[in-house]
Amino acid sequence: MGLLDDETAITSVGDGTFRARLSAAWSIGANPNGGYAVQPVLRALTEVAGRPDPASVTVHYLRPAIGERDGEVHAAVVRAGRRATHVRGSLVQDGAERMTVAAVMTDVTVPASDLPDPGLTLTPPSIPPPERCLDRRELDQGVELPLLSRVDVRVRPPDGTAVVDGWVRLVDGTPPTTAALVLFADAFPPAANGVMPRIGWVPTLELTVHVRRRPAPGWVQARVECDDVVGGWMIETATLWDETGAVVARARQLGLLLGGG
């Protein structure tokens, strides 16, 4: 077990309710990163579904989660099918719901059908290896990043576009899991930084991640693109590949640009 497992631990208290405590070590600014804060909920949903992988996860962030604070996770099965189980969950801290989660749980190693694979896929872009990329700590982002004590994020030097290319892994060397891909999809600096002044904290309002495969051990490569900014509302799309070049997840999120720190 690594730090992500240790610091997202849940304890069942019955009837789909679990105790959890978030660590402040995974924060951006004063609050836990959204991709981290959802991890205890994903663990509870995995348990109630009895299936190992989140094929689809949609998180609505109602208010920031709180680090070093106890909370309750609620998880329930909506419908169980032969290949997938629909589930829903939430995280409550200080009597307030922090997020709601809808997910489709499955085993991504088991084919959904016997139809032939047409070979459709996305090829990862050619970027410098992690050791020749910038550590995210080297970027001027206008916000404190305790998250980087837990997640190693490397990025290709900015080139004036709203695209972030880079690599991500857990600092402690724990191999990536399908649940960790949800964290990785939310671990990079805002892509809009490439075309706007220093932005600072960009709270995520909604995040959807589609997990395609279990990742191979090692670095995960990512491309994050901001393709729409209107009135401070930002849309980002991300694709993640494992070290074999296979697409392991795709993600899309809605965030708010709140200004520099």
Image (cartoon, grey):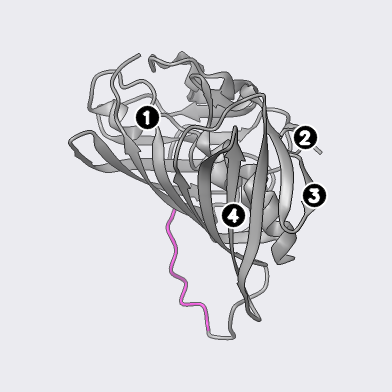
Secondary structure at numbered mark 3 = strand
- Residue 6: mark: 2
Badge 2, how many Cα within 10 Å: few under 14, some, many 20+?
Answer: few
Q: Residues within 10 Å of mark 3 (few under 14, many from 20)?
A: few
Which tag, 1 or 4, sits closer to the chain's start? 4
User: Could you tell me how far apart the alpha carbons at marks 1 and 2 are, in whole angstroms?
Assistant: 27 Å
Q: Which residues are magenta?
A: 116-125
**Disc 3 designates what residue?**
13
Residue 106: % across, % down: 64, 68
Q: Which residue is mark 4?
A: 89
The earlier-in-sequence mark between 1 and 3 is 3
Q: Main secondary structure of the magenta part?
A: loop
Mark 2 or mark 3, which is nearer the start of the sequence? 2
Residue 147 seen from this side: yes
- Is residue 220 in view from this perspective? no
Q: Secondary structure at mark 4?
A: strand
- What residue type is disc 3 on? Val
